[in-house]
Image (cartoon, coloured by chain):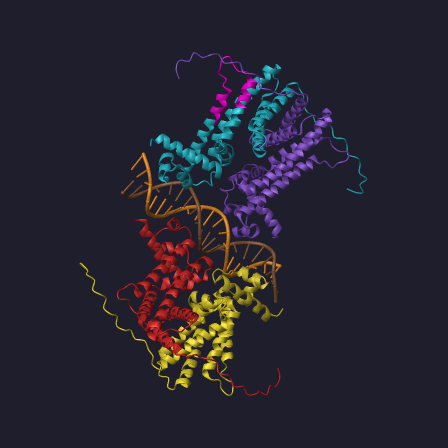
Chain colours: A yellow, B red, C cyan, D purple, E brown, F orange
DNA sequence: TATGAATGAGATTTCATTCAT
DNA sequence: AATGAATGAAATCTCATTCAT
């Protein structure tokens, strides 16, 4: 069996094991067994547990980015509108993570909590997606509402919030069976869109002054 | 030294170690040393690594909920408006997580990835916060925009998204030190507020039909 | 509470724990708790686990010997016949060990398997009982069958076998509920008595020559 | 070195250590060192201390049963008389236990005092031997003394007593080196044989009435 | 290319024992 | 007379990793 194929089998097994058990709790024994090969072979191909984990991160990150980019596909002619790209990208994100829960767990839960070598790798991917989303948001805002006028920092924060909201909604959708992934995506898009629109029109919230509490006939202090 | 004091020292050390290293990578040796006691004493007081972790979760969850609830404080007379409560709660949330990054890591990153006994404990806390936020959103919508007319389900989804966004922003704000709690809270509040307003006015996003892509003169494959 | 009483409580707890768990598996914590005192007090009174175990052995050994000797009671006037003494002693042995299973376990199962300091203590007691039984057997044989003519060594072996048979029967009686301890004692006495009588009459078994096996038309070897 | 060989070495070391130190006091470290391997290898092959102990029990029990059965060997043609089989079996038993004192200690002293999983395993072996002896006794009685007329239950009790006596004598013979296996077997065989003969002739012991003790002029207490 | 055999280092947990009061 | 607080040492067990073939 050619090396490339075997390596993919090992990565499959590793992603599954890391995703379900966590980096530390996953054992090389289990991974090798799940891959159907002997342990020394895993070491021969992937050198160490750290490097194996790293390879998992890279593969899953690339797959996720490819899925999102591919779906949003800004290369078609004539160009697809930005809001539609955003929607397609979000949908692809939800679909992909739902289809590969272990891969998503590796990226989202595991890699970020295992210290520097790994956090950096996943941070790079995250940055790529966030900046992509940021671009789309800005463009969508411009095309829909004219001049953006949103400070860059606010856009970055929004992108971050959007991703968190997406993750939260994904978990919510999984628990309440009646809510499909698509429905969750729609809710999110809806929310983001309405929020974006409101923001562009300057609908901002400012803390209204709190009415002074009624004086308590306090004795002292 | 009395038992109660020692226990708190141990919990402090454990939260810090769990938060930084992760549940599996944290060793009881390190925790005991950080707490300035011997390992057997940790076991005498807290029985096992699992129970120690559980105690950390409970303590940090209680502290977080207390901080948020205390800040939002719906008990004052005359009552504070719901939007203000939401803002105060969010600010307290960001402040608290910024002040106790390890505690937040235990709740958000570690507990949720270590299987059932722990995930359930933190899920309960999260549910409490979500339902609290749901109440506030519904009330804020009613008082600010008249009759809500938002279906209950949409409000629930909004609350889920809001909490998820907050969680995500907490991590972001912790990394980029330059973002203060107030700033993060403002970003989120703005977005939610604008989104709420937009939604109540029926500003919904619907996928616009994609123009059929130009036929590609496909060569082969 | 006076020291002597407390000490007996501790010994009670220790015998029970040692008997049920074994020397090594019994923990001083459990013993102290069962005795209703704190651990340091156990150490104050009995110094160490070894000495505590030793004290248990001595107490239980003394009690067993006293029970057997008291029942067989060779001091009454007029003297009780030897066979009757043997029967009484055996019955007392069975009764005592049945009433104090933990004490018997300490002597029989635990002390003998925990290396030298303890094995010696219980061996002394065993020697005392065996020699007592040996005397009775010899005397019984003499009074019942005239001149003993049994070599001393054979008598010692018989006593040893008798004790083993007694233990085995005790276990058997416990499993098959229908066999009472008394019945077992009777069976044993019966067996010993009949065997003794046979032996005194010279009824010995000698290996009869084995008939040569039929020649097998073996090819080779 | 092939796995099967290593496993036997480990079992050898384990039997020796368990037999001399007892189950709890024996440490896996010591066993591994005695076997000349590292501790992890012991765990790799035998999984846990409990399973290692269990494997020891099974191996030693099988060896003992095989030795006894092989010596008694009821398959030869023409058949060996039952009394001769009994003698051969007893001799083999004493020889075997003398040759493998640690194995015998594991079966007799250790396994029976370590709670249910182990006690049951050794009880099964014992039951097998007891029923084998029961058969031989019944057959020997029939062939030597004509119609048995001994109730089945009495034969069973006899077999229990015989096996117990043998076990006890095995310990005795091991301590007093001067007692050979043949000697022990002869002692026991003699006793059993004489007892069997006596029983068949109705020589039973019944408690003779104790003469009323002379009234003691009791002073006080 | 592939593996059976093997281990050093370190994990959690328990226990007999002591000290200060 | 009695105990709450504390620990050094050692137990069982796991794991990432390597060697010889």
> Which residue lies most toward the front here?
B147
Q: Note whether A54 is above or below B38 in the view shown.
A: below
B42 or B83: nearer the eye?
B83
* Rendered location of residue C11, percent (x, y): 41, 33
**Residue nearest the observer in this picture, F15 or B9:** B9
Please determine whether, in this image, residue C206 is positioned above or below residue B139.
above
Picture quadrant where residue B219 is located:
bottom right
The verdict on residue C30 being magenta is no
Residue A7, how many percent across, how many down?
57, 68
The one of C76 and D164 positioned closer to us in this rendering: C76
Q: Main secondary structure of the magenta part?
A: helix
Task: Answer left or right for D59 relative to A57.
Answer: right
Vertical position of residue A49 compared to residue D129: above or below: below
- Confirm whether residue C9 shows in the render: yes
Residue C135 seen in the current view: no
Tell me where the magenta segment starts and ends, as one range. Answer: C64-90
Q: Give the left or right position of residue C138, taking residue A118 as reference.
A: right
Decide whether residue C79 is among the magenta residues.
yes
Q: Position of residue D183 (x, y in %)?
A: 63, 28
Q: Residue at x 26, y 70 (%)?
A: A210
Is residue C214 found left or right of D184 in the rendered image?
A: right
Residue drawn 65% across the image and 29% down it: D155
Q: How far across and how far down the image is residue B116, in percent? A: 47, 58
């Amino acid at each position: 069996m050619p090396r490339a194929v075997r390596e993919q089998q090992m990565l499959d097994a590793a992603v599954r094991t890391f995703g379900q058990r966590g980096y530390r709790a996953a054992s090389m024994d289990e991974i090798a067994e799940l891959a159907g090969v002997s342990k020394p072979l895993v070491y021969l191909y992937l050198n160490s547990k750290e490097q194996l984990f790293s390879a998992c991160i890279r593969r899953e990150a690339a797959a996720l980015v490819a899925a999102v980019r591919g779906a949003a596909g800004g290369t078609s002619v004539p160009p697809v509108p930005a809001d539609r790209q955003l929607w397609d990208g979000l949908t692809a994100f939800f679909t992909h993570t739902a289809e590969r829960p272990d891969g998503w767990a590796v990226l989202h839960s595991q890699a970020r909590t295992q210290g520097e070598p790994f956090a950096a790798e996943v941070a790079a991917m995250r940055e790529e997606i966030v900046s992509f989303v940021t671009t789309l948001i800005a463009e969508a805002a411009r095309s829909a509402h004219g001049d953006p006028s949103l400070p860059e920092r606010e856009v970055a924060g929004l992108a971050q919030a959007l991703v968190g909201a997406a993750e939260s909604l994904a978990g919510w959708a999984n628990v309440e069976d009646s809510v499909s992934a698509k429905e969750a995506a729609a809710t999110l898009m809806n929310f983001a869109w309405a929020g974006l629109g409101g923001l562009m029109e300057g609908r901002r919230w400012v803390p209204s002054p709190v009415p002074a509490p009624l004086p308590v006939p306090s004795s002292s202090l």
